[in-house]
Image (cartoon, rainbow, N blue to C red):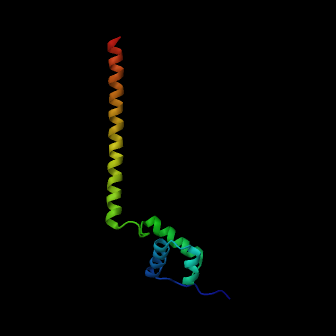
């Protein structure tokens, strides 16, 4: 007969992910100690990384990072525009000189 599926609350999942992130211990070792499947813990870690909740950045830091990335994209667009203008001026000067 199949076993009933165990459910883990969010606090337990976050704690398990935090243990792996902060201690640097292998996932298999932490999973064994907590009595959960290694694959399950890997899944929790992957989800936390995708959500940005792996303990590396706070919410305000993630917001600032997103803002800085947007600024970087805007600056890149502006640089491309200026390079195109520069190239146009070079072509115009070459034609004018001839």
Question: In the rendered view of the protein, which quadrant contains the N terminus?
Answer: bottom right
Residue at screen point 32% across, 49% down: 71
Residue at x 52%, y 83% (from the top left corner): 7
Q: Tell me if 19 is positioned left or right of 58 in this view.
A: right
Residue furthest to the bottom? 1
Please identify the quarter of the rendering in which residue 3 is found. Answer: bottom right
Which quarter of the figure has residue 65?
Answer: bottom left
Q: Position of residue 57 (x, y in %)?
A: 38, 66
Query: In this rendering, is residue 33 above or below 65?
Result: below
Question: The C terminus lies in which quarter of the figure?
Answer: top left
Q: Residue at x 43, y 81 (%)?
A: 11
* Number of numbered callouts drawn: 0
Residue at figure coordinates x 45%, y 75% from the top left? 18
Where residue 76 sits: x, y (%)? 36, 42
Q: Is residue 4 above or below residue 91?
A: below
Is residue 70 found left or right of 43 in the rendered image?
left
Q: Does residue 67 appear left or right of residue 25 in this picture?
A: left
**Place of residue 58 in the rendered image (x, y in percent of width and height, measured from the top left):** 35, 67
81 displayed left or right of 31: left
Specify the quadrant of the image occupied by residue 53.
bottom left
Quick one: which residue is furthest to the right in this view?
A: 1
Q: Nearer the viewer, residue 75 or 27?
A: 27
């Amino acid at each position: 007969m199949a076993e009933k599926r165990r459910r883990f609350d969010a606090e337990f999942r976050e704690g398990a992910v935090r243990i792996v992130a902060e201690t640097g211990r292998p996932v298999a070792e932490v999973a064994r100690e907590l009595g959960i499947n290694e694959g399950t813990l890997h899944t929790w870690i992957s989800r936390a990384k995708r959500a940005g909740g792996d303990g590396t950045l706070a919410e305000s830091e993630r917001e600032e990072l997103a803002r800085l990335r947007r600024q970087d994209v805007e600056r890149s667009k502006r640089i491309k525009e200026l390079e195109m203008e520069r190239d146009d001026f070079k072509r115009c000067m070459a034609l004018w000189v001839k």
